[in-house]
Amino acid sequence: MTTPNSVPAWDLDAMRAQWQAQDAKLDALLQLNRQHARAQLTGPFRTRLRLLSVRIGAGLLVLAPALVWLGSFAVAHREDARHLAPAALLLVSAIALFITGVRQLVLLHDVALDAPVVTLQARLEAVRIERLRATVAALAAGPLLWLPVLLVVSKGWLAVDLYTVANGAWVVANLAFGALVLVVVGALVHRHRTRPDTTSRTWHALLSLLAGETLADAHRFLDDLAALERDASEAP
Amino acid sequence: MSAAPDTEPFLDQLDAHRRIVFKVASAYARNAADREDLSQEIIAQLWRAFPRWDRTRPFATWMYRIALNTAISWWRTESRRARRLQPAGEGALDVAAPDPEEHDERLAWLHGAIAALPETDRALALLFLDGHRHDAIAQIMGLSESNVSTRLHRLKQRLRAMV
């Protein structure tokens, strides 16, 4: 980064006065549109944190009846290992998702933005890490869990036993397809690490997530916050 | 239906300290549209937290905490968002002229240098430049005073190295 030619030896302390001198200009140039602000404040406003809590809460509301249904399905088929096994797998996965959702809501419930910056950011980043882990786990397990979903939903909702309708080769083929999807995703992630695709923001974000970059960044930020909190021994 | 909460005391305080919203939003937003988006978010969060403001404490200090927390969270999530939270358009904070710092080369350069800093160092730089003492910065950031002094010292060295 280059400085303008007219800038003398640069010093943050020296620029402090100049920075604060801007305050009078800002006061003159900035106008608070009270009518607009009043309308926003008295209306139903959305903040990002509130939307996040709503999204997590909505997810739990959807997941809760699914948990109950899976539990009753597992009990009803406790003598039938072919259907009990996939139901148990889905039940464990759903319980893990539910628990992580509840943990996030608990963390977000106490969030007060007037808390000290470092303390609050550490908490928000902890929530973010929870969400990232759950998302990555869901995406990674998805290709392998869709067959159990198919088996359980067919039996539970449609009363169709796919084990008898289709043969064992069909089951193996579906498992193999799921594994193939994981291999393809792995290849895309590897390619992303060497040649990131920046044409699509959403695609780039998804691959960064699957590549572990987003989670690593979150951990790095947490480490930075922890380092910031530690008392430094170096004297100014 | 309950009566709408009285917004005037809040708007009075917001009006008196509106430049804090602008400065923080400017430090964390990439462009004018993002700055407007972030400003709206900051104002919304301030309003939600307003009932908890301890009237015996300076509003500016309290406001800075919320503004910085909102801005840093916004910055860390913004790169993953594909759309704005609110449509572009009229905002609560109107700028009557082009960016006030643009015509001052040194300040424009300083803004650029601050924008290149990590999120938390950006907050430290803003608070220092705004004239807050180390103990006030420590209170806002949740750090010890000695830590603030050390971090600011390193920050100054780092910014000097950018020259």
Image (cartoon, coloured by chain):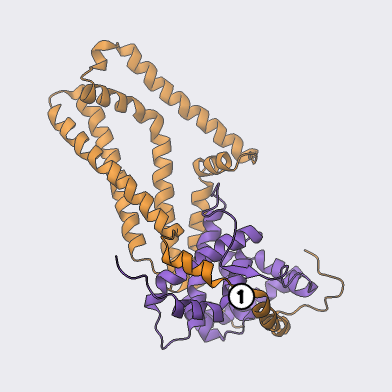
As displayed, is residue A120 above or below residue A64? below
Q: Tell which of A177 and A72 is nearer to you.
A: A72
Q: Residue at x 23, y 17 (%)?
A: A160
Identify the image quadrant of residue A124: bottom left
Q: Kindly give the residue lying farthest to the bottom in the view shown.
A: B56
- Give the left or right position of residue A97, taking residue B141 as reference: left
In which quadrant is the C terminus of chain B drawn?
bottom right
Q: Position of residue A74 (x, y in %)?
A: 17, 31
Q: Is residue A36 above or below residue B12?
A: above
Identified at 34% across, 30% down, the residue is A145
Subunit under mark 1? B
Q: Disc 1 marks which residue?
A: B126
Location of residue A114 in the rendering, given as x and y in whole percent from the top left corner: 43, 73
Residue shown at the point (40%, 58%) measured from the top left = A50
Q: Position of residue B2 (x, y in %)?
A: 30, 68
**Image coords of residue B151 (percent x, y):** 58, 76
Snapshot quadrant of residue A7: bottom right
Element on which disc 1 rests: helix
**In this orientation, which residue lies closer to the viewer: A31 or B63?**
A31
In the figure, is residue A169 to the left or right of B160? left
Q: Colour of chain B?
A: purple
Vertical arrangement, residue B145 with respect to residue B105, above or below: below
Q: Residues within 10 Å of mark 1 (few under 14, many from 20)?
A: many
Q: How many discs mark residues in the rendered view? A: 1
Residue A230 in view in this figure: no
Residue B54: in sight, yes or no? yes
Judge left or right: residue A156 versus residue A129: left
Which residue occupies 55% across, 81% down? B16
From the viewer's side, name the closer residue of B123 and B89.
Answer: B89
The residue under label 1 is which amino acid type? Leu
Q: Which chain is orange?
A: A
